[in-house]
Amino acid sequence: MSPLDLTRVLILDPELGFARLAARLAELGWTPADAGQATAPAVAGEPALATWSRGGHKPHLVYSCNPVAWLRVLDMDTCPPLLRGLIANALPWLDQDALVQRLYTPAAETRLHAIWGLTELEALDALDAIAALGTDTEPLVADAAARAVERLAAIAEARAETMAALTTVAQAAEPVVRGLDNPAFTRTLMPAREDCLALFDAPFADALLPLLAELARRPPRLAPGGRLSELAIHAANAGLLRFPNPASAPFPTGWRDIAPWLLPAPVWLCWRWSTPGERAGVTGDGLVWVNGRWVWLPKLPRRMAPLLAETLHPHGLH
């Protein structure tokens, strides 16, 4: 599987013991957090919660374990695709198809594991298969299925509301995108340091100051040309840009690399000018609403790549 297709979490193989997991992550350069467990683990050597970092800094990994069905979940939310791929290649885990197959196994514990795992993956297209277990002969499984259906339905509703809101933002930005061929206008979109502090993790806000100086000297412009008459604009919260979903799909893949270091709430835009019936077009990105105004940081993934390669050493973004 391509690292770009990996979801926010991995459902680890139930047979993967914690000691083996920790050893493999150490080989990849991850260091465990110093904080101890608040309570003793229910099973010796199998903590319910554990975290790792890259030398004490982002990105982080969060591991949780439910020993009732040995549901082992590794949350990789703040990892860019490259690191997710390295982790996925080093560990045994179950994808959505494998979990769906486990819904039909005779062992109640395995069915329970599958329900919980699919819920963690927010696998909306498995909702019907999970709902069918609402009449399972094992009460614990039936109850888990009912709860999972309720949670997945709420997630589906929230996603629809989010996409509707993002569509509204994209529509509101059309006059701004159409004005990006005018340097006098784009000069008003140049970011200040306070804008960067509202958009990026603090260390990167200051590291991007040379970029601000460059943009101030030579305000960018984007002129699509007269032949390109169709404009499609897409919007996504930075938090959604971290993993595959309908909002992140239109964005260049480089945005997945930098998304963990963007503060999650601000809404970013990408767009494409095209001609009906032709594949050629002109693309743009980096427009964001922050501090009550529009700011433009074009080609941001390329500009941030050297900073991230340094941060992620020795498995940096190359």
Image (cartoon, rainbow, N blue to C red):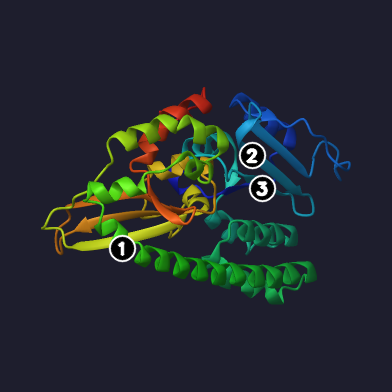
User: Are the two marked residues, 2 and 3, in contact with CB atoms closer than 8 angstroms?
Assistant: no
Alpha carbon of mark 1 to alpha carbon of mark 3: how far? 41 Å
Task: Write the residue at 48% across / 39% down.
Answer: 193
Q: Is residue 176 above or below residue 187?
A: below
In the displayed structure, would residue 287 be above or below residue 136? above
* Pointers 2 and 1 in contact (C-beta within 8 Å): no
Residue located at (59% from left, 37% from top): 91
Mark number displayed over residue 174: 1
- Res 161 label: none
Of the image marks 2 and 1, the number of the one nearer the N terminus: 2
Residue for badge 3: 73
Q: In the rendered structure, which amino acid carries the disc numbered 3?
A: Val
Left or right? Give the position of 190 relative to 12: left
Q: Position of residue 118 (x, y in %)?
A: 61, 59
Return the x and y of residue 273 as percentages of the image width and height.
22, 57
**Gap between marks 2 and 1 measured at Cα:** 38 Å
Label 2 sits on what residue type?
Answer: Leu
Q: CA distance from mark 2 to mark 3?
A: 10 Å
Which quadrant of the figure contains the N terminus? top left
| Percent x, y of residue 147 | 70, 70
Left-right relation of 26 to 143? left
- Mark 3 crowdedness (10 Å alpha carbons): few <14, some 14-19, many ≥20: many
Residue at disc 1, secondary structure: helix
Please tell me which of labels 1 and 3 falls first in the chain. Answer: 3
Residue furthest out toward the bottom: 135
Tell me residue 232's x, y (percent). 28, 62
**Which residue bears the numbered disc 2?**
61
* Residue drawn at (27%, 51%) of the image: 185
Which residue, as the protein is rendered here, is positioned at the far right? 40
Say which residue appears at 17% left-offset and 55% top-offset.
279
Viewer-nearest of discs 2 and 3: 2
